[in-house]
Image: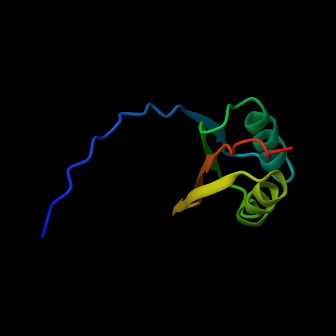
Amino acid sequence: MARRVGHHACIMVTTIKLDLTGLKCPLPALKTRKALKALRPGERLEVHCTDPLAVIDIPNLLNEMGDSLESTERAGDRIVFVIEKAQPAAV
């Protein structure tokens, strides 16, 4: 069986951290939307928040905007979302 050896490219991915701890609904979703609009496609946004409603609001926002939720983690009262900015829709 032949083994295929490929070349690997090193790609730098920019991740911006957004600390929204202590903010209540609707501020985490509104500030996340604003931050995502400033990102380029492929860049990532790491959102830290403590509002329990964010687990509903942030995924709904991403569904509306077309961006990708890469992961959601909980640690105590803190919720961390990692979001990747989507490529613009083809016209």
Of all residues, the one furthest to the left in this rendering is 1
Q: Looking at the picture, tell me which residue is in the foreground, 25 or 84.
A: 84
x and y, in percent, of residue 4 in the image: 21, 56
* Vertical side of 33 occupied by 80: above or below: below
Quadrant (top left, top right, bottom left, bottom right) of the N terminus:
bottom left
Of all residues, the one furthest to the bottom in this rendering is 1
The residue at 71%/63% (across/down) is 52
Instruction: Answer left or right for 4 relative to 60.
Output: left
Instruction: Answer left or right for 62 relative to 10.
Output: right
Q: Quadrant of residue 57?
A: bottom right
The residue at 71%/51% (across/down) is 67
Coloured how? rainbow
The residue at 26%/47% (across/down) is 6
Q: Quadrant of residue 7?
A: top left
Instruction: Answer left or right for 78 relative to 40.
Output: left
* Vertical side of 80 occupied by 44: above or below: above
The residue at 60%/39% (across/down) is 42
x and y, in percent, of residue 10 in the image: 36, 33
Q: Looking at the picture, tell me which residue is in the foreground, 13 or 45.
A: 13
Q: How many marks?
A: 0
Quadrant (top left, top right, bottom left, bottom right) of the C terminus:
top right
Q: Looking at the picture, tell me which residue is in the foreground, 30 or 64.
A: 64
x and y, in percent, of residue 72 in the image: 57, 61
